[in-house]
Amino acid sequence: MLKKKETLVALAKKGIITPEIKAVSKFENIDPEKIMEGLSEGTIVIPGNPNHINLNKIAGIGKGLSTKVNANIGTSPVNCDIKKELIKLKYCIKYKADTVMDLSIGGDIKKIRRNFLKKCILPFGTVPMYQTAVETTVKRGSIDRMTKDDIFNTIEQQAQEGVDFMTLHCGIIKETVEKLKRNERLMGVVSRGGAFLVKWIEENGQENPLYQEYDRLLDIAHNYDITLSLGDGFRPGCLNDATDIAQVSELIILGELTKRARERNVQVIIEGPGHMAINEITANVMLQKKLTKGAPFYVLGPLVTDIAPGYDHITSAIGGAVAASAGADFLCYVTPMEHLSLPDEEGVKEGIIAARIAAHAADIAKNVPMALNWDREMSYYRKNLNWEAQAKFAIDPMKINNRKKIKKSANGKTPCSMCGEFCSMKIKI
């Protein structure tokens, strides 16, 4: 297996413009020197493990770049069909997610991940704690019987296989667990990885190994140029729990850990909430940027209301647009079935499209040139009633290309049944 002798950050600090920097520069239409500067400072990351042989769509995430979208796939203990998950992976690529994460907790997790890596051309992420917890439960009967070596061996195994970025809940510590217990939440800990670690800490009376032996983690990340996505184990799972002591305390710790990672030339992303009222989002983004000195911010939503199961791709897109326009860099999609079931491939598509719309809306607010140009082109072709060109520029061309239903509803006389002969674009002014 390959190992990277010098990380992308180390090379950037030496003023070397790597192929990865060139690829991001070309996609974003930004000078490569700016990408290099962002990597050096830690405000930009480019996830890419040299062992991920099939990676050919590089994604830059961070300051000054277009907002990126992640899509989650993976099995559960009650729904474990690798063929269906591989179809979802195809949908992730087809509908232009920027990255993919495997959140599998059912079946042969190693085999599933290896199948994904063979097919995935996008940066690929995991939550190593899932594999560790599942394997420990199978072998020893309980999550709290994990050992430190179990955790770090899983991380290194996944790094060797080619995983590009990893969610790791390093900011959960004994002190914050006590704060959580003293300040009772309505929904407690909703992060699965976070819950695993809280249980382990409480049952064993020991400190979180990912925090206590953070340097060991940095060694692995450096060897394989893994991007650490420092997880928000205490993210709020409902509006009631947002911006509380546990969430903010964890974020403060993540800021300290970000500094240590940068000193080792390891790339870092910070993960964020969660469920949150729309009026709290901007302040949360500003706080994250302040405490981490501009580290890329990766948010799950945020979902701006708790009352819309079945429509949470919409509640998430609303929050994501607000968060990204305030400075968040990376949106994790949420599917319509987020709180109900594992999504099917159509749910994956809807989640990706909703998140991409949110990201694009934010990019317009950020004055990202290619976002503004995209809308301008679409408006030109809409003005000229050029349906073929509109399909080309639409975020979901299939919606426009499915013309048979449109024509049928308009009695075949016009491609649009909204206005017919009274279309404002046909009135000469």
Image (tube, rainbow, N blue to C red):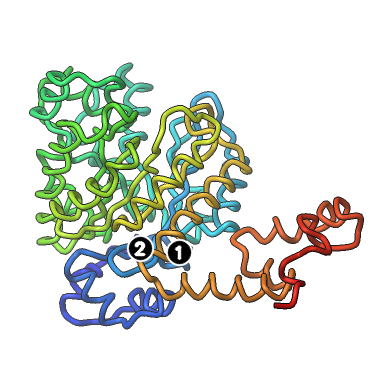
Residue type pointed to by label 1? Leu
Q: CA distance from mark 1 to mark 2?
A: 8 Å
Give residue 310's quadrant in the image. Answer: top right
Q: Earlier in the sequence, mark 1 or mark 2?
A: 2
Give residue 94's quadrant in the image. Answer: bottom right
Query: Picture coordinates of residue 7 (x, y %)?
Result: 23, 67
Q: Quadrant of the N terminus?
A: bottom left
Circle 2 residue: 48
Kindly tell me whether residue 293 is visible in this rendering.
Answer: yes
Give residue 418's quadrant in the image. Answer: bottom right
Query: SS at mark 2?
Result: loop
Q: Quadrant of the C terminus?
A: bottom right
Circle 1 residue: 55
Query: SS at mark 1?
Result: loop
Query: Picture coordinates of residue 274 (x, y %)?
Result: 33, 38
Query: Picture coordinates of residue 18 (x, y %)?
Result: 31, 79
Check whether the beta carbons of the residues at disc 1 and disc 2 lie within 8 A of each other: yes
Residue type pointed to by label 2? Gly
Residue sitting nearer the eye, 220 or 292: 292
Left-right relation of 240 to 320: left
In the rendered picture of this protein, how many numbered marks are placed on residues?
A: 2
Kindly tell me whether residue 113 is visible in this rendering.
Answer: no
Residue 185 drawn above or below residue 391: above
